[in-house]
Image: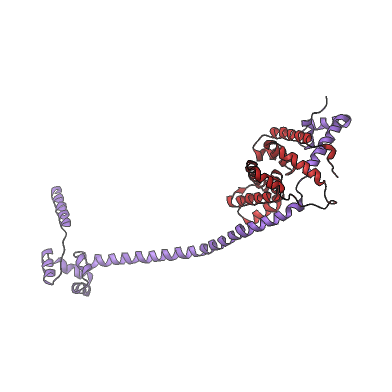
Chain colours: A purple, B red
């Protein structure tokens, strides 16, 4: 039985696997009709394949397209890379300076709170809003001593004193209500 | 070797190796050098911009061939819809005339082959071009066109059969 064109084409393309390949080779060695047909198919393949665009015909396009892409894309990428690299150096510096700034800010806040708790526990609004005579008075004495001095007076006396000095003292109702509620609660508990 | 399509070194390496194949695919689908050049440019720009990692140069090559083939076929479809444009293309200079002594095959034969390839139905044309002009094996063609190897085998055979019937063998000369 002779070989059909599809098998010969597959053999021609070197895609025929064993055992078919050996069988085809064996058949072609003695069957002149199949050998002739194989030669025709090979000739056809050569004619088609050799009608290809040749290397020297496409070299011009190869250079042209590469120079276009190089100019418009590859070199652009290098520019972007350069900017990125600059950023990569700058970013840690930015971050560390931001961290340092935050550290200092936090420190300042803690110190501020410390001063408040020492000197203005009883009348914080007075100390904060009027940095005048009374503050100087408190600061002049030792912090502990100032607390002790203030403790000797009732809230009413302190308010009267501040009023006579011309300070505008603002006591919020909300705070008082809370105080009363707390007081009631604590009484109820007792 | 791994290929990163947006890396300029990788890109140039792939370009150097793959351009001739891609250009041949584009050319033999459209049979117009300028159009083929534009298609290749578009394909390589897409390749660069997509920023894909390929496990090997061959994988990058298959990707590029697939994109180029699709672009070229779309161009041909568009052109055939605009008959006037087709006529214009045909009037344009095809391939620069080469020195007769250098060529492997004469220009008349090339023209006949070209005319026959142009007449092939799209499915057979793609397979034949990838086989004869991109020098790929059945497995590679199958993976590019997303069809089975045995389907490629059948299509190669059918395409050659039609080509044979269209070409007058008496006029063919291969040196």
From the image, which quarter does the C terminus of chain B lie in? top right
Residue B143 percent coordinates (x, y):
66, 39
Query: Is residue B62 visible to us here?
Result: no
Q: Is residue B98 left or right of residue B7?
A: right
Q: Can you say whether A34 is above or below A65 in the image?
A: above
Query: Is residue B148 visible to us here?
Result: yes
Q: Is residue A49 left or right of residue A178?
A: right
In this view, the residue farthest toward the top is A1
Q: Is residue B43 left or right of residue A101?
A: right
Residue B84 percent coordinates (x, y):
65, 44
Quadrant in the picture for residue A100: bottom left
Considering depth in this image, is A44 or A103 the residue closer to the camera? A44
Residue B150 percent coordinates (x, y):
70, 32
Considering depth in this image, is B37 or A112 the residue closer to the camera? B37
Q: How many marks?
A: 0
Quadrant in the picture for residue A30: top right
In this view, the residue farthest toward the front is B84
Q: Residue at x 74, y 41 (%)?
A: B115
Residue B54 percent coordinates (x, y):
63, 47
């Amino acid at each position: 039985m002779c070989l059909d064109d599809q098998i010969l084409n597959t053999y021609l393309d070197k895609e025929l696997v064993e055992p078919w390949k050996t069988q085809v080779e064996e058949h072609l060695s003695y069957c002149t009709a199949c050998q002739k047909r194989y030669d025709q198919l090979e000739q056809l393949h050569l004619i088609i394949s050799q009608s290809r665009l040749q290397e020297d015909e496409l070299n011009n396009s190869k250079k042209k397209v590469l120079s276009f892409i190089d100019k418009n894309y590859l070199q652009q990428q290098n520019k972007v890379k350069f900017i990125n690299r600059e950023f990569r150096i700058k970013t840690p510096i930015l971050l560390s300076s931001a961290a340092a700034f935050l550290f200092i800010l936090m420190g300042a806040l803690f110190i501020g709170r410390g001063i408040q708790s020492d000197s203005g526990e009883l009348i914080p609004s007075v100390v904060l809003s009027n940095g005048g005579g009374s503050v100087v008075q408190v600061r002049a004495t030792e912090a502990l001593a100032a607390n002790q001095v203030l403790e000797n007076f009732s809230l009413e006396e302190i308010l009267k004193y501040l009023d006579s000095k011309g300070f505008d003292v603002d006591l919020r109702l909300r705070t008082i209500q809370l105080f009363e509620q707390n007081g009631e609660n604590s009484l109820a508990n007792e | 070797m791994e290929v990163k399509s947006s890396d300029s070194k990788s890109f140039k390496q792939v370009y150097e190796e793959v351009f001739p194949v891609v250009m041949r695919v584009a050319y033999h689908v459209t049979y117009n050098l300028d159009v083929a050049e534009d298609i290749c440019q578009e394909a390589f720009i897409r390749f660069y911009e997509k920023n894909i990692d390929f496990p090997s140069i061959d994988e990058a090559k298959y990707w590029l061939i697939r994109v180029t083939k699709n672009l070229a076929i779309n161009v041909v479809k568009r052109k055939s819809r605009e008959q006037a444009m087709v006529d214009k293309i045909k009037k344009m200079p095809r391939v620069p005339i080469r020195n007769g002594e250098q060529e492997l095959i004469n220009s008349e034969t090339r023209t006949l082959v070209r005319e026959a390839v142009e007449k092939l139905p799209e499915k057979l044309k793609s397979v034949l071009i990838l086989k004869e002009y991109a020098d790929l094996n059945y497995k590679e063609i199958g993976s590019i066109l997303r069809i089975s190897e045995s389907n490629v085998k059948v299509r190669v055979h059918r395409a050659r059969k039609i080509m044979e019937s269209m070409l007058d063998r008496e006029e063919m000369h291969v040196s």
